[in-house]
Amino acid sequence: MEFLKAYLDFAVFGLLGLMGFIALWITLERLFFYRRIRLQEYTHPEKLNIALTHNLTTLSTIGANAPYVGLLGTVLGILITFYDLGQGHSIDTGAIMLGLALALKATAAGIAIAIPSIMAYNGLMRKIDVINALYRADYPSAEK
């Protein structure tokens, strides 16, 4: 239990930090790609759609799972607090409440990663819809 106590925050916040970095990286990469895309290079609408949606599943997965990673950190933090309490250590009420409050920071961090990730995903999906509509309007003879 001491190992978990010592490394829980590093593991949870490290994983959430990595998820946040990947989400930001994908979002920026996609925005730059959409800005420089040349529709005339695509001969088929499905090839265009494949290029447009590249890595968006990863972004959606990060947005959907970041709260669960945070919740896992919270549950483990509460487990540690109750374990310490059950060991018979003389812990005052303030220390218990502090341990529980600190455990909740992992959930807050997970939500803080999830909200912008899902917002970015939804914004990028809207941009894909616009690009596909422009493609259909500008190249109606493209193979369908």
Image (spheres, rainbow, N blue to C red):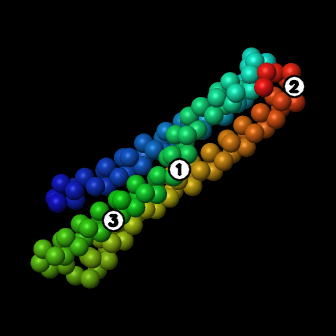
Q: Residue at x 42, y 42 (%)?
A: 18
Judge by depth and name the residue closer to the eye, 141 or 29.
141
- The image position of residue 121, as x and y in percent, is 62, 45
Q: Of helix, strand and loop, which one carries label 3?
A: helix
Kindly indicate the quadrant of the structure image that contains residue 144: top right
Q: Nearer the viewer, residue 38 or 17?
A: 38
Numbered tag placed on residue 3 in the rendering: none
Single out the residue that lies furthest toward the left.
Answer: 88
Which comes sooner in the sequence, label 3 or label 1?
1
Picture coordinates of residue 120 (x, y %)? 63, 46
Per the model, the C-alpha gap separating discs 3 and 1 is 20 Å
Residue at mark 2: 140
In the displayed structure, does residue 44 sit left or right of residue 30?
right
Q: Which residue is mark 3?
A: 75
Give the residue number, with chain letter if any, for mark 1: 63
Q: Residue at x 83, y 30 (%)?
A: 136
- Of the image marks 1 and 2, the number of the one nearer the N terminus: 1
Identified by mark 1, the residue type is Gly
- Dot 3 crowding, Cα within 10 Å, few <14, some 14–19, many 20+: some
Q: Quadrant of residue 115?
A: bottom right
In the picture shown, does residue 86 fall above or below 129?
A: below
Judged left or right of residue 67, residue 51 is right
Q: Residue at horizontal 22%, vertical 59%? A: 5
Quarter holding residue 8? bottom left
Element marked by disc 2? loop
Q: Are marks 1 and 2 in contact (CB under 8 Å)?
A: no
Element marked by disc 1: helix
Disc 3 residue type (three-letter): Val
User: Which of the two residues, 107 or 133, is positioned nearer the viewer here?
Assistant: 133
